[in-house]
Image (cartoon, grey):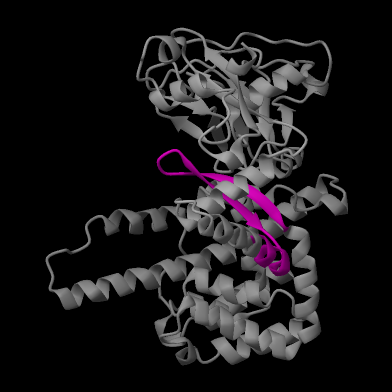
Amino acid sequence: MDTDQAESADIATAAVPAAAAPAVTRLGASEVNGWIAALVAIDRDVDDASRRDQIRALEDLKSAAAAAQALISVDFDASQRRLQAEAGTPAAKLGLGIGKQIALARRESPKRGCQHLGLAKILTTEMPHTFAALTAGLLTEWRATMLVRETACLRLEDRHAVDDELAADTGILEGVGDEALGALARGIAYRLDPHAALARASKAEGDRYVSLRPAPDTMTYLTALLPVKAGVAVYAALSRAADSLSAGGDMRPHHQIMADLLTQRITGNPAGPSRIEIQLVMTDRTLLQGDSEPAYLPGYGPIPAQQARNLARDSGKTNRGNRNDERTETWLRRLYTSPGAGELIAMDAKSRLLPRALKRVIKTRDNTCRFPYCNAPIRHADHVVPWRISHDTSEANAQGLCVACNQAKEAPGWSAQPRPGPRHTVEITTPTGHTYTSTAPPLPGSSLGAYPTGLRPVPPISKAAG
C-alpha cells in the first residue's frame, strides 16, 4: 500500500466510531450489488414515523457511499498513475484520462469525473473532519463539495483551519442551508487569507465564457459567465434601454424588450444587414408534404415540423414589425436527410486532415462531443482510429470531440473502433478493459432506432435573394 492509500485508509477508519465498526468481511462489488438488490424489497408497510426514518437512513447511506467512492477513486488514481509511469508516460502527462474513466463508471460527464477525483483527493488528504462527516452521513456529497470549492484558494494550513472550524463540530452545520454554508466557508477563507481571495477573483476572470443550452418549448438558455463589473454593466445597459423604449410607447413587457435588445445588439451590424446562418436539418416530406416528422437544429435539438416550415418560409425576411430588428436577415442552410434508413453519403479523402465540408457534416451529425455523458461543444473533428494506424479519413472513421476528450483518448491503454449500428457508433475501450459505446444522436427521417445519418448539404438559400 502506498502513502496516499495508507492515509486514505487511516482517515476512513477514523471516520467510523469504533462501536460502529462492522464485524464483516470487506465489501466488494458483488456485495454492494447485493445491497442494491435488497433495497428493492424495502419495507413499505410501515407508519409515517418509520418512513421518515427510512428516508433519513437512505440519505445517510448515500453520503457514506460517496465517501467510499472517494476512497476508491484515490486508490484508482494512484494505481493508474503507477501503471502509466511504468509504461513510460512523461511526467507532465501522468494522470491523463483517469478522471474520464471515473466519469464513465459513474455515468457522468468527463468534467464531472475530474471534479469528483479532485474532491476525493482533497477530502481524504486535506479535510479529514469534512470527510468524516460525509462518511457518517452528516454532510451530503454536494455540501462537502461546497466546502472544498470555497477553500480552494487557501494554503494547506488555512484549509485545515476551515475544516476544524466548520466540520470538527458537525452540530454547527445543523439547519444551515447550502447558500449559508457556502457563505460561512467563504467568510472564514477571506478572514484567513484575504490576498488569496483577491488572487482567486483575478484568476476567475480567465474562466469567463458564453454557453447555449436547450430550454423547453424550442427556447434556449444563452448564458454568460462574466466578471461582476461587466455583468452588472451589461444588465444595466439593457435595462436602461428597455426603460427608454417603454417610455416611448413600446408595449412589450420589460423583460421581453431586454431579450430582444440583447439579440439585436449582438447580431446587428450598423453598416448594413447582418447575415445569420442557421442550419436546419429536415426531411423533404417535412418541408414539402406537411409531414409531422420533427426537424433538427444543430446546437439545439429537435423542433416541431411546423416551426421548421415557418423558419424555411420566413428565411431572408426582415422583421418589419419591429423597427429595432430591420437590419437582421436570417439565412438557412438546409440539409436534407436521405430517404428510409439513409446511410451517410461517403466523403473520403486522401489527406490526413478532414476536409472542411466533412467537418461540417460530422459536427451536424454528432451535435456535441461524442464521449459518453460529455455533451460539451465539439472543438475537434477526430479520427476514431488514428490516421497513423488506419490512414482512413472518412465519415465512418470520424467523430466530433471536445478538446479534453480528444487529448484523453491519447493516454496509454485507450482505444476506439467504429462499430456497426443503426447509426454511427463508436466502441471505446478504457485501460481497465471496460468498453462503452457512443452512438450519434437521432436526426429526422426514420423510425425510432434507425435514423438516417445521411446528409446532403445544400447551399445557403434566402428568399430575399430569390
Q: Which of 428 and 83 is in front in this view?
A: 428
Q: Please determine whether, in this image, residue 262 is positioned above or below residue 466.
A: below
Q: Position of residue 340 (x, y in %)?
A: 43, 8
- In this picture, which residue range is highlighted in magenta? 208-234
| 142 to 76, vertically: above or below | below
Q: Residue 458: x and y, percent?
A: 62, 12
Q: In which quarter of the image is the C terminus?
A: top right
Q: State the image quarter where residue 270 is shown.
A: top right
Magenta region includes residue 223: yes
- For the point 37% across and 70% down, the residue is 59
- Quadrant in which the N terminus is drawn: bottom right
- Outermost residue toward the front? 248
User: Could you say which quadrant of the image residue 130 lies in?
Assistant: bottom right
The structure residue drawn at horizontal position 73% and vertical position 38%, both measured from the top left corner, is 269
Side of 84 where 217 appears, left or right: left
Is residue 405 located in the magenta-colored stretch of the structure? no
Image side of residue 321 versus residue 100, left or right? left
Q: How many labels does the image show?
A: 0
Res 73 seen here: no
Horizontal side, residue 318 vs residue 3: left or right = left
Quadrant in which residue 144 is drawn: bottom right
The image shows residue 250 at horizontal and vertical percentages of 49, 51
Front-most of 150 and 412?
150
Compared to residue 155, the image places residue 438 above or below, namely: above
Q: Is residue 137 shown to the viewer in this render?
A: yes
Left or right: residue 38 compared with residue 355: left
Image x and y of residue 286, in percent: 41, 15
- Residue occupying image coordinates x 55% and y 76%: 12
Closer-to-camera residue (320/275): 320
Q: In this view, does 73 lie above or below 465?
A: below
